[in-house]
Image (cartoon, grey):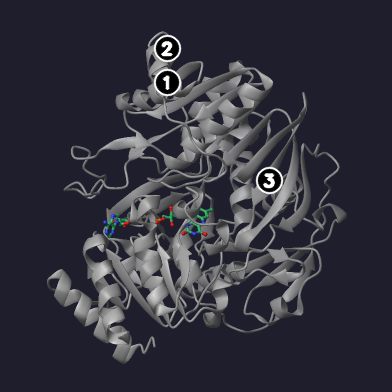
Amino acid sequence: MKICVLMKQVPDNDSAIILSNDSSSIKLNDITWCTNESDTYALEEALLMKEAHGGEVVACSFGRESSQQVIKDALAKGADRGLYISEEESDGFDILSTAKIFTQALKDENFDLIFSGLQSNDSGNAQLGLLLAEMLNMSHAALVMGTEVLNDTRIKVKQELEGGWFQWTELDLPASITIQSGLNKPRYASLRGIMMMKKKPIDIFDSSQIDSTGSKNKIFLDKMYIPQKVKETTFIEGTPDEIASKLGDLMINDIKVF
Amino acid sequence: MNIFVFIQKDNGTINRNSLEALAGAQQFARATDAQVSAVCFGEVNDQLTEYDIQQVLSISDPGLNSYNPQLYCEAFNQVISAHHPDMVIFGHTYQTRDWVPRLSAKLDIPFVSDCIRIQNQNGLILTRQIYQGKINTDLKVEGSVLVSIQSGAYRLDSIVSGNTSVQQFEVNLDSVKCTVHPGEKFQESKGSVDLSRAKIIVAVGRGIGKEENMPIAKELAEVLGAELGSSRPVVDYGWLPHEHQVGSSGQTVSPKLYLALGISGAIQHQVGMKGSSNIVAINKDGNAPIFEIADYGIVADLFEIVPKITQTLKDHKG
Ligand SMILES: Cc1cc2nc3c(=O)[nH]c(=O)nc-3n(C[C@H](O)[C@H](O)[C@H](O)COP(=O)(O)OP(=O)(O)OC[C@H]3O[C@@H](n4cnc5c(N)ncnc54)[C@H](O)[C@@H]3O)c2cc1C
């Protein structure tokens, strides 16, 4: 199996997200970057499949220069090669145009499978892998919680539905699937892996030549802002002891927990 | 402006999110004199003919009787080619997540997913949350657009009743070569925990840090006689079994008291617990979205507060 894993660099959970002065972007200076969480599960699933069935795992990332770190981490965990799609300015709003760039970068690779995390923690479009399925003429499944290779031309996936339900779906290859968190235990890079990483190639695809804006249907950013609170929250303040006693009082006398 | 709303059906019943999307479309239409039509695969539920919409397009084809993303895409492709709606609205269901991106690529029409508002301000403005609910973006549209609406963004009871007519629309799906083969649906064996009946839930999020810290929450649950609930990461990491997960992929709960410890309050978590009578959130980040829906908030390190609360309650019980 020749598997591509799409991986995105996003702010880590503890980074403060602060708007730029003109409210058109966020301030990038103080952000600590990490690999998008569900993408790490996608990589692990690809590595497990390669270990069981042979093949190649290519880690692919698109974005600012520092995104190559995401690829390096994947190489250290066991991916065979990297593909970095360079790009200076993407606002992440127009995911359809972004998918067209990916299509150009991936079309000659003829991957059997494309894995991606189901949604990024920043823009949260939850679409890229599925847009690519149509553009690259692949089958697809979203919200995948398990994979099984049936034969050279077919896989079976377990898809998550709402409220604790699941569904089995079979997919003809090639297929693009988006991976939900929790289906495996993502590995850490070993020391050996980190040494090997330095010898693995990262190809660079220059996206500046590609005109992805051809569609007559477009979306634009109007503005970004901090959401208004809709509900009045009563905040309980004080020292930890004071808070504990006020909250205890609230629970016992007002909410009547006992 | 012509707006189509897709009505998803699950075992014949109209999906709630589709109706919320319809309520949103009606609201937008009243402000702009747009026309709203509903699109429905298979038999039209009587319920649908009692709403104030221009028409219901009913598409009957054996291929659409159960969900298949490629047949759905082609059917909708034919609807859109014939009618050219300016905006098509979906509920942001898991099914929508699965097929509407593919439709977007097929039609070359952008899909703005998981919107919390559609409004008119010198043109269409779509609002969606980014950075996990920490920031909102307003987007403008040129040309046509596909939109999905977040669960709960519009109220079901705001749907306006009225009359409508049903039009049949013929599709031909013969050209589709299906490479996606959906199979049976199933539920994993149910555990012993039924959170939907719990009176008190102590819910643990990623803020608990590591598995070794779980007893801090368990002790509080014990003294309260509460069930333990959790957000998704806690289950993903294997710190609690899946039956404890609250949210869109887990259980929906409505206890008298929901105590959220180190939970940020992502929409997928909120949909499972916002019906609780009293929500108390402890989170060290005062901007966490959980404080959007909490009745009582404590901005603090849970490790400093929770053991003290447990002690306070123990002392009270004597
Ligand atoms: C399709 C789909 C379905 C999903 N289904 C579900 C679902 O069913 N249920 C669900 O919960 N999620 C679900 N999610 C995931 C959801 O989007 C969030 O990622 C998840 O709810 C986050 O969990 P969390 O709040 O525990 O973690 P985080 O978002 O990481 O939040 C941790 C919080 O803990 C706080 N914190 C950290 N340390 C401390 C401390 N010492 N004291 C106090 N506070 C602290 C932080 O400030 C932060 O707010 C789903 C996602 C998708 C895309």
Residue type (three-letter) at the residue carrying disc 1: Ala
Q: Is residue B212 left or right of residue A22?
A: right
Q: Are marks 3 and 1 on the same chain?
A: yes
| Foreground of the two, B31 or B90 | B90
Q: Are marks 2 and 1 on the same chain?
A: yes
Q: How many marks?
A: 3
- Examine the rendered structure and indicate whether residue B309 appears above or below residue A43: below
Question: How many angstroms separate mark 2 from mark 3 (CA)?
Answer: 33 Å
Q: Quadrant of residue A61?
A: top left
From the image, state whether disc 3 or disc 1 is nearer to you.
1
- Residue sitting at the far top: A199
Q: Residues within 10 Å of mark 2 (few under 14, many from 20)?
A: some
Q: Position of residue B241 (x, y in %)?
A: 55, 57
- Residue marked by disc 1: A76
Residue type (three-letter) at the residue carrying disc 3: Lys
If the image is split into quadrants, where does the C terminus of chain B sit?
bottom left
Q: Quadrant of residue B259?
A: bottom left
- Residue marked by disc 3: A158
Residue type (three-letter) at the residue carrying disc 2: Met
User: Answer yes or no: do the residues labelled 2 and 1 have beta carbons within 8 Å?
Assistant: yes
Q: Position of residue B54 (x, y in %)?
A: 65, 73
